[in-house]
Amino acid sequence: MIVPKLVRGFLDEHSDKHIDFRFHNSTGLTMDMIQGLKDRRYDVAFCSYVEQEPTIEFIPIAKQELVLIVPEGHPLESRDSIDLKETLQYPQVGFSTRSGLHRVIKKLFEKCGGHPEVVCSVEEDEAVAGLVGAGFGVAVVPRMPILDYMPVKPIQIAKPSWERNFYMATLKNVYQAPVIQAFKTYVAEHADL
């Protein structure tokens, strides 16, 4: 993941100072992280972009690849790439509406001209992959290292075209300590786009 690499690089560059990072995962959901920023529980959040959040600054820091995953033994398992339109006939495991991925994936299927049958929806990437591995359906998920250790096959999405960025989010128009400003600058300069 890019975030630990950015934090490590920042700390190495500022090794002469005592800087303390505290990591919070909350539920891992973008809306919970945005609320944490607004409540001043966090100075910085790494999450999906959220529209109509005028008090939040979103800075893209990385592109995130999405893949289709299928369980072992699935008819699509032999494929290396796919047009998502070809998956409409298969039951799918989706993300709950609270997940930033829900909107992204919904837009992908709108480009295909249809919507799959979603047999269940959960919030976390790993839970979606686990349900796919157990044979509940197929799913579109971020490419993540854990997929290599699960009974699923990742398949590249050739169509429709898409792009998903991962963002650093902070509150606008509030005082931020110099170390927070320095970290934001470091992250923006070292973004993996």
Image (tube, helix red, strand yellow):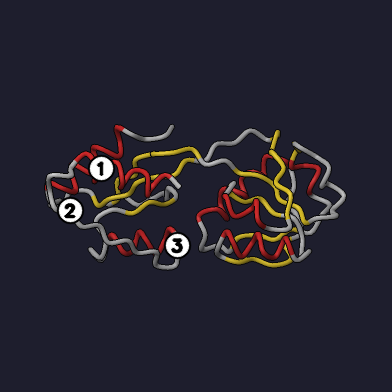
Dot 1: element: helix
* Image position, residue 167 (x, y; %): 39, 45
- Which residue is denoted by mark 1 in the rendering? 10
* Image position, residue 148 (x, y; %): 65, 51
- Which residue is denoted by mark 2 in the rendering? 19
Callout in the foreground (1, 3): 1
* Image position, residue 86 (x, y; %): 81, 43
Q: Mark 3 or 2 closer to N-term? A: 2
Amino acid type of disc 2? Ile
Of the 4 image quadrants, the one containing the C terminus is top left
Q: Residue at x 34, y 44 (%)?
A: 58
Disc 1 residue crowd, few under 14, some 14–19, many 20+, Cα 10 Å: some
- Which residue is denoted by mark 3 in the rendering? 28
Cα–Cα span, label 2 and label 1: 10 Å
- Nearer to me, 188 or 38: 188
Cα–Cα span, label 3 and label 2: 24 Å
Cα–Cα span, label 1 and label 3: 23 Å
Q: How many numbered circles does the render carry?
A: 3
The answer to whether marks 2 and 1 mark residues whose Cβ atoms lie closer than 8 Å is yes
Asked where in the image residue 191 lies, by quadrant, the reply is top left
